[in-house]
Amino acid sequence: MSPETEETSRRNVLTAAGTAAVSVSLAGCLNSSEDPSDGSDSDGNSGEGSDGGESGDGSSGETQLLRYGRGSHSGTIDFQNSTSGEVAKVTVQMYDTLINFEPGASTLTEGLATDYSLEGQTATLTLREDVTFHNGEEFTASDFVATYRRFVDDSYEYYAGDDYVSAYGPFTLGSWIDEIETNGDYEMTIQLTQSYAPFLRNLAMFPSAVHSEAAIEEYGTDLSNTAVGTGPFQLENLDDGNERIRLSAYDDYWGEGPSVDEAIFVTIGQNSTRAQSLASGELDIVDGLGAQASQQVDNASNASLERAEGINIGYMAFNIASVEPFQDRRVRQAVSYAIDTEAIVNEIYAGFATQASQPLPPNVLGHNEDLEPYPYDPEQAQSLLEEAGYGDGFSFELATFQNPRGYNPSPIQTAETVASNLSEIGIDATINQQSFSPYLEYTAQGRHDACFLGWYTDNADPDNFAYVLLHPQVDDQYLSEEQDWVSFDTEGYNTSNRSGWANSEYMDLVEQGQSTYDESQRQTLYQEANAIAREEAPWVYLDYAEELRGVSNRVSGYTVAAISGPYLNLVSLN
Amino acid sequence: MISGRFVLKRLLLLVPVLLGVASLVFSILHLSPGDPALTIAGNRASEEFVRQIEESLGLNDPIWVQYVDFLVNAAQFQFGESFILFRDASVTSILIDKLPITIELAVYGQLIGISLGIPLGIISAVKQNTLTDHTTRVGALAGISIPIFWSGPLLILLFAQILGWFPTSGRISAIYNVEAIRLTGLLTIDTLLYGEWEMFISAVKHLALPATVIGIYSMALISRMMRSSMLEVIRQDYMRTARAKGQGSKITVLKHGFRNAMIPVITVIGIQFGSLLGGAVLTETVFAIQGIGGLLVEAIRVGDYPIVQGTVLTFAFLFTLVNLGVDITYSILDPRIDQ
Amino acid sequence: MSTETTTETSDELTQRGLIDRFRASPFVSSLLSNRLALAGIGIILAMLVVALYARFFIDLETITQSQLGTNPNREPPSAAYPFGTDGQARSILPRVAYGAWYALLYGTATVAFSTVLGVGLGILAAYYGDVADNVIMRTMDVLLAFPSLLLALALVAIFPDGLGLWRAVIALTLVYTPRFARVVRGAALTVLENEYVDATVALGAPDPRVLVRHVLPNCLAPITVQSTLNFGLAIIDIAALSFLGFGAAAGTPSWGLMLSNGVNLGLLTGDWWWSFFPGAALAVTVLGFNLLGDGMRDALDPRMREAVD
């Protein structure tokens, strides 16, 4: 090669190299003037950025921004538009309900109603005065009525539409409310369709929040991306592209706080990446941590893992109607004895859950303290099987979903453990795994032999578990004395009951509990119902999962709430 | 030379292809398991409520009605509203929101690829069969063989976690209100236009690792193409000139060769668009960047059909257009092609 | 490559047996003298040995099931566990070895199906021309209108989860077929224009003989090269689909799935070995196929080189 050609190519290379070098050094030397808090610092000094540093230290008089990291974005900010918990996290910052849950507890307290009571089929509420919406309008009873009608009344001029409203419309309010009467701006009486004990709790659920009547009329279905509420924060920006929602403090909020100027919800899909962002100071609070990511947070020096009892249950349902062996209670009990739930909870869920013993979790009224989880006892299982005439075993298909859910962080592994436990007593379980959406359809139609599922409470009321999940809700004419199950095809069958169980004693107790208002009476009723449910074992009770949050050290005032959180208005930054 | 007839003919041929594409997308999604109405309704819904949703979505209409509706809407870029991920937002608006995210990533990746790949390809060609050449060739092959979902996370581990030079994920730090300055959706452009220097730096730092990952792959492809087309041209021109002039001026040969060699390279850069999109899906998943690639994967997972339909159709359409453009450009540039 | 190599005329070519032609062709000899291609062959053979060993001597049950309680969990590489253990306390080395079997098995299946389908469609399109040609090639155009991973993703979503990795195989077969069809159709058209073949047809020879004896051998070189190149592509694409969660069922020792778990669950907690080894195995295998494919393309007659993608 001649020197000249080498010159040409060398020039090309140099130009290219030069450009590359410049851009790399630009990034590098810009970095050295800032705190490297975007990466991780293992010696504990991350999170406190130098001025202008990216960790967003804002406490020296600049805007205080609270950064909340979660696993998926919520594309709508209208609480009537979705049943998703992700949507709820954001709407509870901007909207209020008539009644609230105490932060971190399941007891009720005042919200937009200062006084409330339930007697017979009438709920009476006195509303709070001097509350303003973000648009300056005063809150009155007519706002609640308009909000309610928009949700469930298709004769209402501003009804949001069949394709817009979520299933919470009828579930929470529509099926139980007959009529609402207002007496002036601040007095309200609600006539129910029946005596319904959980009703006040339903008013505390996120879909029961209040829209401004003026906003309903002005925005209609645009309320899915605009918010006019009475809550502590107002909507600053809904960025669907970058999947973030930015809120700013509402100074005229009637309640406590907020202590920060702004809050932002950021989406980071992978649990470990989200935990990493917390550890490196890029976020302040994160949720949706699985077992592994929780350990990451635990090991971080500038953040801590906050845990609280959840109000949920994970279980394996027997499809009693379609699998003959399951129709014998002894077989279901045998399976319950054969599955080692302690090992599952300790090893697969890494100790972030406790063994379940009954349908109601411990912090719900009616949980029966005297009931123990089924111990791991393969011998007892074997003898029960023989008693029932299935000493030689049998086989069935266990359906499971693939992606982790809060009440079951490792469904496939859990399924494999269950299968291997059962093979020891001669029962052969084949695993059928599906993605969640087809899985829900598959199991709702009763096509499974057994399936995994779980439930996060809506309102911390026993009825929300006992009735919704284990009562068939069919007419008496379809029930039979000889069997305690019905087929999924039965008219009006409640598909949330994935077991087909129809036990009349249980059903009676639970129906009574639903319409009894006396707390101690309800407690007794549900305790009895739980005892039956444990004994009859329509489910294998797997676990009650904890609520886990990663919280940065600069955050104070944050309580882990199993229901109705996060209470960001109470949070302050150091 | 290129004739209007050629372009027109190709454009007309697009129509049946796009029709086929739309039909394929429609049938794919209607064959998928899972009931969209049930998914939307969620598991608090009564059967009656699910029926209600089915009605309102038109899912009870006969299939050919749904098909025709779909085609008519698709032709106007209407893909309906998202079922789940962005409840009630129109798919078109979501795509408009997210397209710049993927484009920004792809463009910077491509720029890295071009600025490194072209010189490397030239050097490799010019020093053919030397150690430099062999090293570069193996290096380029390695670049294509290394999966993005392996190299990406390793880069994150090394540069973001251990060394702490770059952030682990995302496009920009959460403290910056980028939504307020949105013009193009391209962070690097918008932040500069508004003079937000700090934001710009944050955006660049977040782009560094993912763009590099894409850039390595792109560089490998481009350097190979550059090398082989450069070799072709050198061989031809050199032989011709050498025979005509005896010795021949090497610089002239190379300069002339370079220009001709660039033609297929430009077309490769255009064709790369397709593989870049595949790379974008994986890169976005690894680096938690919420562009169209990540959107598609998530939408498939949860069964949000309108988004899947809209995304796949848009990509197919763009891809077809780009291919058409490349074909036309190629035939304009290449004097050998006789129209 | 020497410019003085003589090429036999196509007449002479068609008169010799297929294998003889293959062995004596300048293609094979220049291929074998290419060191990079030889390195590629070496890597592929090594992986094949590992894959076969795994298939016949490693117990799939043991390496799939969780070993929590038996083995140490998330152990870094050590003497007892050369590649370390993963989040279910399974030794990673035998899983990576078994992954080679899956990669080669499913990769071969994908390439085989798409080659057969593509060749068949290409020859049919070229031979029958007119309507058949248009219909087939327009359909191929439709498939080619999609970026490959996108089409594969969209297709994979239809199939029930029970099929596992076969979903990826079917989807990718449909994605790769058009490229073969195009290449083969082009080559077939060139051959069909040869008068010799027309003469045979005029004499009334039945279709299959014409197709197999005259058209196919001339497409052999580009088909072989395209197949080899697609092999590497298939292995990576299958791993990518598994990585995104649309491939292997959980627990399966597939490289893509191991990478996915390793990255999502292990990487940021510092358990780098969980994702490093499967990824390295993947990269090396694909590199082997790419080295070979590249060498093959170099060895190709320049005329045919343009036909190959």
Image (tube, coloured by chain):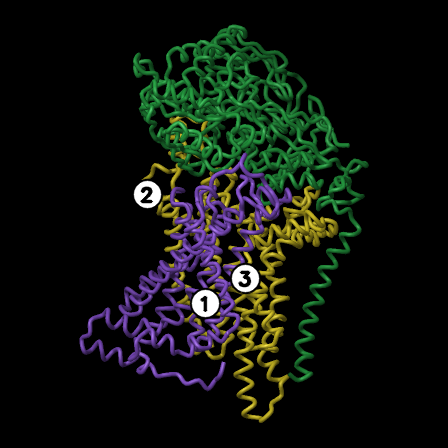
Q: What residue type is disc 1 on? A: Asp
**Position of residue A374 measured from the top left corner of the image (x, y, whole percent):** 48, 19
Q: What's the distance in space between the residues labelled 1 and 2, CA to CA?
A: 39 Å
The residue where tag 1 is placed is C309
| Residue A258: assigned label | none
Tell me: residue A308, above or below residue B306: above
Respond whether the residues carrying marks 1 and 2 are from the same subunit. Answer: no
**Position of residue C296 measured from the top left corner of the image (x, y, whole percent):** 46, 71
Q: Bin the neighbour count of mark 3 within 10 Å (Cα to Cα): few under 14, some 14-19, many 20 and up.
A: many
Quadrant of image for the C terminus of chain A: top right
| Colour of chain B as rendered | yellow
Respond whether the residues carrying marks 2 and 3 are from the same subunit. Answer: yes
Q: State which chain disc 1 sits on.
A: C
Tell me: residue A467, above or below residue B241: above
Foreground residue among B74 and B271: B271
**Chain in green colour:** A
Looking at the image, is mark 2 or mark 3 nearer the viewer?
3
Q: What's the distance in space between the residues labelled 2 and 3, CA to CA?
A: 43 Å
Foreground residue among A226 and A405: A405
- Look at the image and tell me whether residue B339 can be seen: no
**Position of residue C149 measured from the top left corner of the image (x, y, whole percent):** 47, 54
Looking at the image, is mark 3 or mark 1 nearer the viewer?
3
Residue A565: image quadrant is top right
Quadrant of image for the N terminus of chain A: bottom right
The residue where tag 3 is placed is B144
Circles 2, 3 touching at the beta carbon (< 8 Å): no
Residue A489: image quadrant is top left
Q: What residue type is disc 3 on? A: Ile
Q: What residue type is disc 2 on? A: Ile
Foreground residue among C135 and A349: A349
